Image (cartoon, helix red, strand yellow):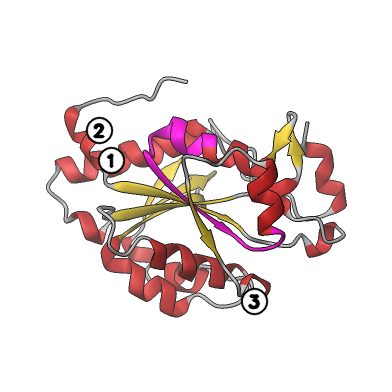
């Protein structure tokens, strides 16, 4: 799929934003089947999420692995990604978010676009739309590291979420259990730019066995 870039500024912004995919969960409510390895359209779910990030405009993608990480490496095509091991994955999504943000230290990334592996209804169009909103913000000379944007669905905040580097330490410090960045985002609600994506994506989760019917 061809990446959509509307201007030189949008391309530069996309190149400075790393995709960060959280894919470490063990699928406790799915009988212990890691979500990254669930099959969707003939391939592991983790591959679909990586493709969404890449096709949406993220040139660099970090994938946080945990449950059955060796099996994910063996069965999913992730050769072009930076794979990050989270030995504390059983502590919840917060630990994966911390591990992923830490892996970006020392890279050229100035922002992270966070996506969850268990939301196959969110594809490249939503990723591209959030990146385009970020590029528009940069074109207005807003400080890049201060960026804080989130996709929204009928006005309700969802994923993907973009964190400028100035927020990483605060996000990591507040991330605990399965809450991820929710606590940080709640306390910074006034600073978030919401980007409506309900017309191009569906923000459902694959959490229970009943949800498996959404996979193809």
The earlier-in-sequence mark between 3 and 2 is 2
Q: Quadrant of residue 41?
A: top right
- Across and down, in percent, residue 61 comes to 44, 46
101 vs 75, left or right, is left
Q: CA distance from mark 3 to mark 2?
A: 36 Å
For image coordinates 70% across by 42% down, the residue present is 75
Please give the range of residues in magenta.
51-68
- Across and down, in percent, residue 70 comes to 67, 56
For image coordinates 52% across by 40% down, the residue present is 79
Residue at the farthest left position: 141
User: Residue beneath label 1, please?
Assistant: 15
Q: CA distance from mark 3 to mark 1?
A: 32 Å
- What crowding class fits label 1: few (fewer than 14 Cα within 10 Å), some (14-19), or many (20 or more)? some
- Across and down, in percent, residue 31 comes to 87, 60
**Secondary structure type for disc 2:** helix
Q: Which mark is residue 161?
A: none
Label 2 with label 1: CB-CB less than 8 Å: yes
Residue 202 seen in the current view: no
Q: Which mark is residue 11?
A: 2
- What crowding class fits label 2: few (fewer than 14 Cα within 10 Å), some (14-19), or many (20 or more)? some
Label 3 with label 2: CB-CB less than 8 Å: no
**Secondary structure type for disc 3:** helix
User: Residue beneath label 3, please?
Assistant: 91
For image coordinates 36% across by 38% down, the residue present is 59
Up/down of 153 relative to 63, above or below: above
Quarter containing the C terminus:
top right
For image coordinates 38% across by 25% down, the residue present is 3
């Amino acid at each position: 799929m061809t990446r959509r870039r509307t201007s030189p500024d949008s391309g530069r912004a996309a190149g400075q934003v790393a995709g960060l995919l959280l894919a470490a969960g063990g699928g406790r409510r799915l009988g212990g089947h890691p979500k990254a390895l669930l099959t969707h359209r003939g391939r592991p779910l983790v591959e679909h999420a990586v493709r969404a990030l890449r096709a949406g405009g993220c040139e660099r993608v970090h994938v946080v692995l945990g449950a059955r990480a060796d099996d994910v490496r063996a069965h999913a095509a992730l050769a072009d990604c930076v794979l990050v091991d989270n030995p504390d994955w059983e502590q919840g999504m917060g630990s994966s978010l911390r591990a992923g943000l830490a892996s970006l230290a020392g890279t050229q990334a100035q922002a992270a676009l966070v996506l969850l592996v268990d939301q196959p209804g969110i594809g490249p169009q939503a990723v591209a739309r959030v990146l385009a909103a970020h590029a528009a913000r940069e074109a207005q000379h807003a400080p890049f590291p201060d960026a804080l944007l989130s996709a929204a669905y009928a006005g309700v905040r969802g994923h993907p979420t973009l964190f400028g580097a100035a927020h990483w330490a605060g996000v990591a410090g507040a991330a605990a259990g399965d809450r991820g960045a929710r606590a940080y985002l709640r306390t910074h609600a006034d600073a978030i730019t919401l980007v409506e994506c309900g017309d191009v994506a569906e923000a459902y989760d694959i959490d229970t066995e009943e949800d498996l019917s959404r996979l193809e």
